Image (cartoon, rainbow, N blue to C red):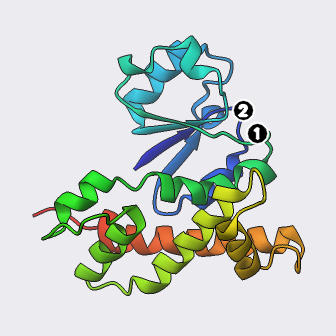
Amino acid sequence: MNILLDECLDWRLGRDLPGHSVRTVQDMGWQGVEKDRLLALAQSRSEVFITGDRNLSFRQNLSYFSLSVVVLQAQSIRLVHTRPLMAKLIIDSLNEDENGRLLPSRISEEKGIAKFERFLAMNGIAAEQVGTYMRRLYGLRHGVGHRKGDSYERAAELFGVGRRPLKDVFVEILIAATELLQLLDRNFLGRKED
């Protein structure tokens, strides 16, 4: 997939998207270009545009553009704040309806991660470890704003928040997220359609 990172973001975020062609606005020579023109240029060369500009959807009618726009909602656009969102992107991009269509049967009350686990297992991929990681990460991010609740406490304990430096926790999360992205890329995105 061709991905364009906005000039407000650190180019190193592209490292967290292995198997994809990631370019920056600077790489393309488009720095300083107004957003409407930038989005028009981006859609001619990319499928996804990632930005940290929270006001973009207020200033632009994104429905005019054929590319997907991802606005990272972080404390700041510094790498330390945006990099953990790459793992969140995995979870939030799970499309429950699409996963449901790909499964041979429906299970009442089955949610996104469980559907995803079943889809992976159906395709011969050991899904238990992936599901466990995703549930832990979801629990951690779900309660992180308030740092309360049972799911946050369990996830924080499992990831070692409070016992280890936060940098080490983030590195572990990012390594696992990168491995998950690589697994999905190898098994699904890299497949050629017959």
Number of other residues with Cα within 10 Å of mark 1, as a class: few under 14, some 14 to 19, many 20 or more = some
The structure residue drawn at horizontal position 60% and vertical position 24%, both measured from the top left corner, is: 30
Q: In this orientation, which residue lies closer to the viewer: 96 or 79?
A: 96
Dot 1 and dot 2 residues touching (CB under 8 Å): yes
Identify the amino acid type marked 2. Cys
Percent from the top left, x then y, of residue 158?
71, 81
Q: Earlier in the sequence, mark 1 or mark 2?
A: 2
Does residue 169 lie above or below 100 as drawn?
below
Percent from the top left, x then y, of residue 179?
54, 75
The structure residue drawn at horizontal position 66% and vertical position 33%, both measured from the top left corner, is: 26
Q: Is residue 108 left or right of residue 193?
A: right
Which of the labelled discs sits on residue 8, or is there none? 2
Say which quarter of the image contains residue 142: bottom right
The structure residue drawn at horizontal position 19% and vertical position 63%, both measured from the top left corner, is: 102
SS state under label 2: loop
Give the label, 1 or 2, closer to the camera.
1
Which of the labelled discs sits on residue 77, or is there none? 1
Q: Quadrant of the C terminus?
A: bottom left
SS state under label 1: loop
Identify the amino acid type marked 1. Ile
Say which quarter of the image contains residue 169: bottom right
